[in-house]
Image (tube, rainbow, N blue to C red):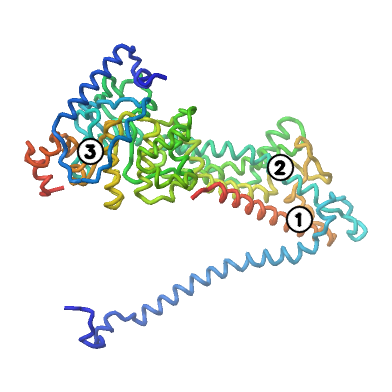
Amino acid sequence: MSAHSSSAGEPELGQLARFAVSPARRRKDRIARGAVLTGTVIALIPLVLIVYYLLRKGLGAWSTSFFTTDPTGNTFFGGSNIGGIKSAILGTIEIVALASAIAVPIGIGVAVWLVEYGKNSWFAQAVRFFVDVLTGVPSIVFGLFVYIVLVVGTGSTYAGYKGSIALSLLMLPVVIRSAEVILLLVPAALRESALALGAPRWRVIFNIVLPTALPGMITGVLLAVARAAGETAPLLFTAAATLKTNFNLGGFMNSLPVQIYKDVTSPTTAVVNRAWGAALTLVVMILLLNLIARLIARRSRLA
Amino acid sequence: MTPDGRTQELTGMDPESSSELGRQRQDRSSEATSGPHRITTTATISPPATIGTDPQAKPALNVKLEQLRAFYGNSEQVKGIDLEFRANEVTAIIGPSGCGKSTMVRCINRMHEEIPGARAEGRVLLEDFDVYDPSVDVVAVRRAVGMVFQKPNPFPTMSIFDNVAAGLRLSAKRGGDMRAKVEAALRSAGLWDEVADRLDAPGAGLSGGQQQRLCIARSLAVDPEVILMDEPCSALDPIATLKIEELIDRLKQRVTIVIVTHNMQQAARVADRTAFMLGGELVEIGPTQEIFTKPNDSRTEEYVTGKFG
């Protein structure tokens, strides 16, 4: 009784028709696929255009002196002596580094508390609510807040570290929420087996939970860093703009977004081009940071 | 540290009563060996001489539950159980899904309370001290009572070596020859010969059965006196299961073993005594052979003969 032997010959037409795809179904499938594909292409258009214009206009501004000299502030003589963006690059690195140094440990700490200790208590829920509110606050508000409290409030003036604080406020909710999501993904079974070995909770967190979550947390932190590095508004009235390279976070400090903001409104074509060059530099810097962090994350993961 | 250091650390007992305890334990284990034996079909059990040779090893502990109740929120899952797990014996817990087997076992090393909203009442005695006594350090209890879970769960970021060493490192029992301790634990878990040449490979790269033996090695490394196994073979194939069962048979010379299982044949193969639970209550406990051949309770008989569950 071999059911598979073809003693009955070819299947009859009636049988085939039962399983055939109807033309209506086929049409609907095509329309749905077409709609999804169109959406994808439309979303890609601005992305491609941004990269295209950045490369076309930005690359033209790039040169060795572009990266090695400070802006001169001199926009006369047809823009032949406007200088580069060294102070802006270094300023952005310094400000964002300090902002990350503030926001990342605090943010991860808050996330660990939320996941491992706070859980669903009312206080944890309140913290989550306020973090969500913070995520939605426009960046200029953080700038204003720091301006009121640290610039006007102290009767002093702009400084790089004040810009860092404004940026760290901006990064904090992103770091907290992304780290929380990743920590929740760490299987409960891992915590349990570590606890069952007689490990104190803090050791479970430091030796098991955090290393397991590390690659994911790096991604979240990077998103926050990338967002902060591109912000202009929080820096405008906190770190201000300046021409000279400054390694003292207590002084005025230039940054790429602020430099772009000032340059792009200039009547001098060369200065506008410098804005494009600076924009491309910013994008490349964030891309590099991404790459490096991904490599680190890959190396640190065993499986 | 004295061989009995942990017991003292937990109970604060004076050494005299502690040695008294040791004598009681010896009595009990000799009693256990002369008692009725398991009905076994496995002929391939390896010679047990490899275990229990460690002079530092602590004697297995008697575990006693007194009116143990466990709750999830307001729902009572374990409804007042009195039960004794004898030192150097394997006790199997059988019963249908949701009857509270796992919950009860997780109360012994206080893992039950790790679930939000979960709590337990009653007493769990390791020899003479109650693990639910307010003065007891939960961490110390868990070092004395190891646990192996249903799904093999080696730490994914760690190598085979580090997985076993993790028990020692996490519980801050550093010092001594880490490598020797890891090797001893892997040998005890019957895994050494398979992994000796790749200790630095990720633990997650092993097969399911090897991973589970790695987890057993990990819990053995901290030198527990009791090991709780919560359906340790349910995710494994029959050959891997057999290896774990042989291992359980050898390990009982060194520790008290409580094994929760859905597999009645497994209970029949490995357990000296078997307890049958139903609806959060203990129906009966007795020598495995009796539970499976002439149980006292009709519900046990119905369950072991496959009429329900």
Q: Chain of mark 3?
A: B
Q: Residue at the right extreme? A: A77
Label 3 sits on a secondary structure element that is: loop
Which quarter of the picture shows residue B191?
top left
Label 2 sits on a secondary structure element that is: helix
Q: Chain of mark 2?
A: A
Q: What's the residue at 53%, 69% (across, down)? A: A39
Circle 3 or circle 1, nearest the eye: 3
Pointer 2 and pointer 3: residues touching (CB < 8 Å)?
no
Label 1 sits on a secondary structure element that is: helix
Q: What's the residue at 70%, 33% (across, down)? A: A150
Residue that label 2 marks: A95
Q: Position of residue A287 (x, y in %)?
A: 66, 55
Label number found at residue B279:
none
Callout 3 amino acid: Gly
Residue that label 3 marks: B100
**Quarter occupied by the N terminus of chain A:** bottom left
Q: What's the residue at 80%, 41% (across, down)? A: A246
Spatial CA distance of label 2 from label 3 is 57 Å
- Quick one: label 2 or label 1, which is nearer the N terminus? 2
Q: Nearer the viewer, residue B222 or A214?
A: B222
Instruction: Estimate how packed mark 2 is, as few (under 14), some (14 to 19) or many (20 or more) residues with alpha carbons within 10 Å.
Output: many
Q: Chain of mark 1?
A: A
Q: Nearer the viewer, residue A250 or B28?
A: B28
Q: Position of residue A98 (x, y in %)?
A: 68, 39
Which quarter of the picture shows residue A25?
bottom left
Q: Nearer the viewer, residue B252 or B277?
A: B252
Callout 1 amino acid: Ala
Spatial CA distance of label 2 from label 1 is 16 Å
Label number found at residue A278:
1
